[in-house]
Image (cartoon, rainbow, N blue to C red):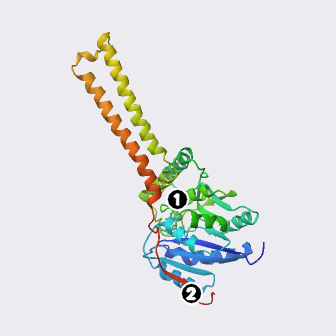
């Protein structure tokens, strides 16, 4: 592998002021081990805590560092997407700014990449998060694997190294707006391998993700990669319609041969039979129709997302850089 090759490190940043300087120093300290040229691309995702100015300083003082400033807060996934478009490396590392993805792990990612893997993703060995969060995460990953056609590795996060070939596929062939990176990455294929690491608690600041945004990320993951939820609706509707038909038959038979179920006869309450049958029938067919509508809307939804999912307002690079 020639020394001319370049690796880009894309880091989305939303209000990470206390972490930035240390992160940059630690990255530069680690970089010797990679034995490859590198650039660090910070993507400032609408920070309001002064991160932007700190990053601007870093970009102006270090030749390897550049900065993309987004016009507002777009979210972590779009910020990563912006970084992937901007990065020029033959390999691109995506990592968080809060030290939860330790810069030291990059060495191992790079090794695997040099060994020929095109997607090297980091797998969290131990989650140091509250039990409930851990439980929800594990349910989410398992559910996603069951209902989507692609296999998203359990407990993989966004921390990974992507070969240029994969970045090009993500950038050029996956125009969809809702970007669930680990899903798209798995979808892309190529030679993939996981590397285990221990995920620490964030160093400083508070997570920008709260329960709501994690829930949204989980929904994006599920609905972007599966239409199974829609199918469940269709099947439920179908099931209820068939049940109503069965009930109808049951009541007709009951009319002919009067018998009791659990000591009770439907004929005891006038109108009960027809009421139950029609309730089931109407409910069932409405849900069935909703399911069918959902199938269409789901497909349209996949197609129409054409708005940019991030907007860059400023690019800062070191003046010495060509
Ligand atoms: N982030 C971002 N935009 C957002 C939220 C988060 O760019 O709207 C960045 C954040 O600065 C960090 C990474 O995405 O570098 C992961 O965010 P966080 O630590 O809040 O999430 P978690 O560690 O819980 O996945
Ligand atoms: Mg974090």
Q: Residues within 10 Å of mark 2 (few under 14, many from 20)?
A: some
Q: Which residue is located at x 48 percent, y 54 percent?
A: 218
Sequence order check, earlier mark of 1 and 2: 2
Number of numbered markers: 2
Residue 103 vertical placement versus 265 (above, below): below
Residue 197 vertical placement versus 298 (above, below): below
Name the one closer to the observer, 54 or 147. 147
Tell me the quarter of the image containing the N terminus. bottom right
* Location of mark 2 (residue): 60
Residue 206 vertical placement versus 215 (above, below): below
Residue 253 quadrant:
top left
Residue 67's spot in the image, x, y percent? 54, 79
In three-dimensional space, the C-alpha distance between marks 1 and 2, rounded to whole angstroms, equals: 32 Å
Residue 23's spot in the image, x, y percent? 59, 74
Q: Which mark is residue 180?
A: 1
Name the one closer to the observer, 244 or 133. 244
Residue 163 seen in this snapshot: no
**Left or right, 84 with reference to 304:** right
Q: Which mark is residue 211?
A: none
**Left or right, 62 with reference to 254:** right
Q: Which residue is located at x 56 percent, y 56 percent?
A: 183
Residue 145's spot in the image, x, y percent? 57, 47
Tell me the quarter of the image containing the C terminus. bottom right
Residue 29's spot in the image, x, y percent? 67, 77
């Amino acid at each position: 592998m020639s020394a001319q090759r370049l690796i880009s490190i894309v880091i989305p940043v939303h209000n990470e002021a206390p972490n930035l300087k240390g992160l940059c120093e630690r990255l530069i300290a680690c970089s010797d081990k990679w034995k490859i040229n590198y650039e660090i691309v910070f993507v400032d995702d609408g920070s309001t805590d002064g991160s932007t100015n700190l990053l601007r300083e870093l970009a102006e003082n270090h030749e390897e560092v550049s900065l993309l400033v987004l016009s507002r807060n777009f979210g972590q996934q779009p910020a990563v997407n912006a970084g992937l478009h901007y990065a020029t490396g033959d390999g691109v590392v995506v990592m968080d700014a809060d030290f939860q993805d330790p810069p030291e792990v990059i060495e191992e990612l790079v090794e695997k990449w040099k060994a020929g893997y095109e997607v090297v993703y980091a797998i969290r060995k131990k989650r140091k998060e509250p039990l409930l969060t851990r439980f929800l995460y594990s349910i989410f990953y398992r559910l996603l694997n069951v209902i989507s056609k692609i296999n998203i590795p359990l407990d993989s996060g966004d921390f990974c190294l992507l070969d240029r070939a994969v970045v090009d596929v993500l950038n050029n062939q996956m125009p969809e707006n809702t970007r669930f990176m680990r899903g798209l990455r798995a979808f892309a294929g190529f030679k993939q391998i996981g590397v285990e690491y221990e995920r620490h608690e964030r160093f400083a600041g508070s997570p920008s993700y709260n329960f709501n945004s994690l829930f949204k990320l989980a929904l994006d993951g599920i609905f972007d990669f599966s239409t199974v939820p829609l199918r469940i609706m269709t099947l439920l509707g179908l099931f209820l319609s068939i049940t109503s038909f069965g009930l109808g038959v049951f009541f007709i038979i009951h009319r002919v041969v009067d018998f009791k179920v659990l000591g009770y006869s439907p004929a005891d309450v006038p109108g009960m039979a027809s009421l139950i049958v029609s309730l089931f029938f109407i409910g069932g067919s409405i849900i069935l129709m909703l399911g069918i509508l959902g199938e269409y809307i789901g497909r349209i939804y996949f197609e129409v997302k054409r708005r940019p999912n991030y907007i860059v307002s400023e690019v800062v690079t070191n003046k010495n850089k060509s």
